[in-house]
Amino acid sequence: MINYTERLTELMRDIVSRVPSLSCIDLDRVLVFARLGRSDADGAYASCHCLTLPETEPGYFFWKDRQTGELTRRSEWFVTKSPQVEIAGRSIHYLISFVLPRFSDQSLERSRKQEFYDDEPAWIAKLDTVVHELYHIDPEGRGLRRAVLPDGNVSNKLHGPTYYEDVARMVRQYLATGPNPELLEFLRYDFKGLTERYGGVVCTTFRNYPSFPQRYNETVTLAADAPNVKIEPLKTPRHTRYTERDLARRLFTPQTSRLAV
């Protein structure tokens, strides 16, 4: 069987070694994992998740009376934190998730990226997605890369006016360096082709699948500012620190996945 996330990681290492715009990325601080997403459903092909975002200022959820606008109840005070992920003693700063089989079944046809390619084969769409997610990693490691506007200001949006064009340029730049065709070979197959070629598609996931490390709320104690308002308790986060013991391998199919033996 093919370990799809391992193949993606190998490809990403080769990309950052050949594309100067991405050379700042330390792949030892990036973990690739898979999520389930059917090809016949809408949704993202992949996502980049940052684990270095700072703790927020204290806040709370609140509810008001619709008629009077008075505060009727609120949650406990909390701060929002990033989970800790440490693999083989290395702190992980970014997670990149690929959604299968949707990622492997994507095509340039009718996609937003199609206008930036001419007669390239359909599998280039997958390489474009890989570079797209790598390009989200901020060069300073302070979060996700923010778009720079034509006037020089930084936008809150992740996709600037030239983002897709920049990604296509880096894809061509990578291919122009003559990478080993064996690194790209697995991209040529859709999910059905992968299963026929390799006998099955195995990926790294987290043991508490389909969950994965995400920002969480942690309660803090502050002076009461509305003593007559009912306080709703917050759920205590169950899992905030992950290691290699929290990883698992799953066998993916077109509709579901199961733990791989």
Image (cartoon, rainbow, N blue to C red):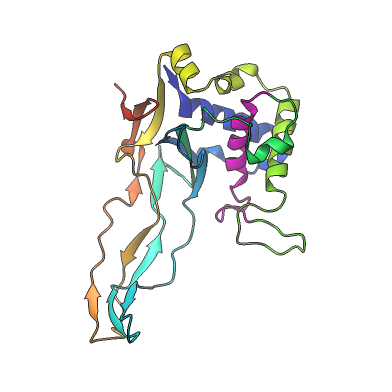
Q: Is residue 144 magenta?
A: yes
Residue 48 % position (x, y): 52, 45
Residue 13 % position (x, y): 59, 32
Locate residue 53 relative to residue 79 in the image: left or right: right
Q: What are the residue bounds of the magenta stretch?
A: 121-146
State the residue at coordinates (25%, 60%).
236
In this view of the protein, which residue sits in the foreground, 257 or 97? 257
Locate residue 189 relative to residue 100 in the image: left or right: right
**Residue at the extreme front of the image, as rendered:** 67
State the residue at coordinates (32%, 73%).
77
**Is residue 192 depicted above or below 231 in this figure?**
above
Q: Is residue 140 magenta?
A: yes
Residue 17, quarter of picture: top right
Residue 110, quarter of picture: top right
**Is residue 235 depicted above or below 92 in this figure?**
below
**Can residue 25 be seen?**
no
In this view of the protein, which residue sits in the foreground, 242 or 215? 215
Locate residue 10 relative to residue 217 in the image: left or right: right
Residue 114 % position (x, y): 68, 35
Residue 43 % position (x, y): 48, 42
State the residue at coordinates (40%, 24%).
202
Q: Quadrant of the C terminus?
A: top left
**Can residue 64 be seen?**
yes
**Is residue 56 depicted above or below 3 in this figure?**
below
**Is residue 43 depicted above or below 38 in this figure?**
below
State the residue at coordinates (40%, 44%).
86
Q: Quadrant of the N terminus?
A: top left
